[in-house]
Image (cartoon, helix red, strand yellow):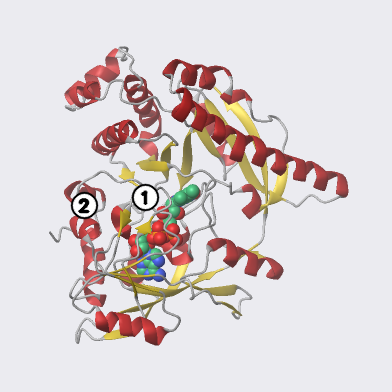
Amino acid sequence: MPSLNREIVNFGGNVRFRPTHYYEPRTEAEVLDILRTHAHGQIRVAAALHSWSNLLVSDDAVVCLRHFRDITTRVDAAGDTWVTIGAGCRVKHALKALRPLGLTLPAIGLITEQFVAGAIATGTHGSGNHGLGHYVQEVRIAAYDGQTGEPGIFTISSGDELRAARCHLGCLGIILSVTLKARPEYHVGERNARYKQLDDVVARESQQPLQHFFLVPHQWEFVAQHRCIVPPVTGPLYRFDRWAYFAGWFVTMDVGLHLTFKLLAGVIRRPSVTRQFFRRVMPYLLIEEKTFVGRSDRVLTWEHELFRHMEIEMFVPRQHLAAAVDHIRAVLTVCDGSEELDPLARERLQRAGLLEPLLAVRGAFTHHYPICVRRVFCDDTLMSMSSGDGHDWYSFSFITLAQPRDGFRKMADYLARSMTQLFGARPHWGKYCPLDGETLRTLYPRWTEFDAVCRRYDPRGVFQNDFTRAALGRQ
Ligand SMILES: Cc1cc2nc3c(=O)[nH]c(=O)nc-3n(C[C@H](O)[C@H](O)[C@H](O)COP(=O)(O)OP(=O)(O)OC[C@H]3O[C@@H](n4cnc5c(N)ncnc54)[C@H](O)[C@@H]3O)c2cc1C
């Protein structure tokens, strides 16, 4: 039975709506009944609601698959273990189930709260790896037959259909389960270091392939978390050392630093204090020159979900990394109210018609969060942000803990528009996305193939909403 008039609110609190019908089916037969009932309406799936974009919205039916969380494994002739995960299983529960088998997932993001089908919907990724969806080899979906329009259950396991399902945007149908090859558990060594030059950080990638780094606003230097696969370290003394590091990280970074950001952005609200904090305190908080080793999912994740925030993340092709850093510095400095703008940057923006719009947001927002930069390998997908022709992408995350968010939105809107125009940058599908459909389509050369797959499983467009319709040029 559907619940009526239930309000859906996402993690960031920026997306709120009341669908007419809300379902939590327990069986595939119930899912097919929902498809029958809404065959001429609209259906979207709500997973862990950790997205900030309008992908989530449906006026008609919303379906939550939280009861679909079975996990099964099989070992193939080559000795590889394949895991089939129910769409409503959280990433953290899949990791927990694989642990006793000495296995883990091939990729994870900074948190593991997402449902597996929700994570792959938007191209969820970490650093020094592909997105999780890239590794998916089979997907079971409840959708509509392209010929008859009748609801049914289909298996997708090859070609452009699989490439579409690997970053599906909720447009193919209701994903019921996802199958991928598990990888043997591994340990990661992490070491923090500060750098003045971008080139010095990037030069470490070959030895530290899982690293990510932060551009420190207002100071404009870099803090890197070097990360690489290492053998596990055991022994009671080391175990204590590691425990102390993770506990220390939780208290100082996951909680303490975030409380400080909230204080700076929400209570003190003085740009000069924020600037001084980032110039004199923030870069020196990390323990440097000591390597800590831990299980991959412990080292690669944070308790980033403790504080509700808003985020935009922009992906630029590798060749534009250095120019993007310079551009971000210029934009954030002007948004912070500065009159100074490097003459070369001014000229470049003037030529691109981006100078006037930047001056219009001068003083709109003082950024108060380190900008996380991650390297994402090219995905074999049609629509994920790092899909493409083989080169790596670098993602830049901009986060705010401030309320209200109008100033942040102005800065984010300008960043999205200018980075797209200058560098072909793509916004994360799951994060704040201010670009219009026409612009989004210019960023994804294979969107027509994606749309064709969607039409094959959904001839009447039941799984589309305003956001996806605009992105696929269906308005
Ligand atoms: C604190 C925090 C940290 C984050 N860290 C990262 C990170 O490190 N890397 C990264 O890339 N992203 C990150 N994200 C973004 C997040 O991973 C994505 O937005 C992800 O899509 C959220 O998954 P979800 O389960 O909450 O899905 P939802 O947000 O609930 O849904 C996302 C989309 O998937 C569709 N969908 C979900 N399940 C199904 C299904 N079964 N069938 C059909 N459609 C479905 C929904 O309709 C919707 O369109 C983070 C988000 C937060 C809040």
User: Which residue is denoted by mark 1 in the rendering?
Assistant: 52
Residue 441 tag number: 2
Q: Residue at x 58, y 67 (%)?
A: 94
Element marked by disc 1 = loop
Disc 2 crowd, CA 10 A, few/some/many (<14, 14-19, 20+): some
- Amino acid type of disc 1? Trp
Tell which residue pokes out farthest to the front in this image.
5
| Residue 331 placement (x, y as % from top left) | 32, 25
| Residue 301 placement (x, y as % from top left) | 58, 49
Residue 348 is left or right of residue 260, and the answer is: left
Q: Residue at x 48, y 64 (%)?
A: 115
| Mark 1 CB lies closer than 8 A to ligand 1 | yes
* Residue 336 visible (yes or no): yes
Tell which residue pokes out farthest to the left in this image.
475
Residue 4 is left or right of residue 244, and the answer is: left
| Residue 145 placement (x, y as % from top left) | 25, 83
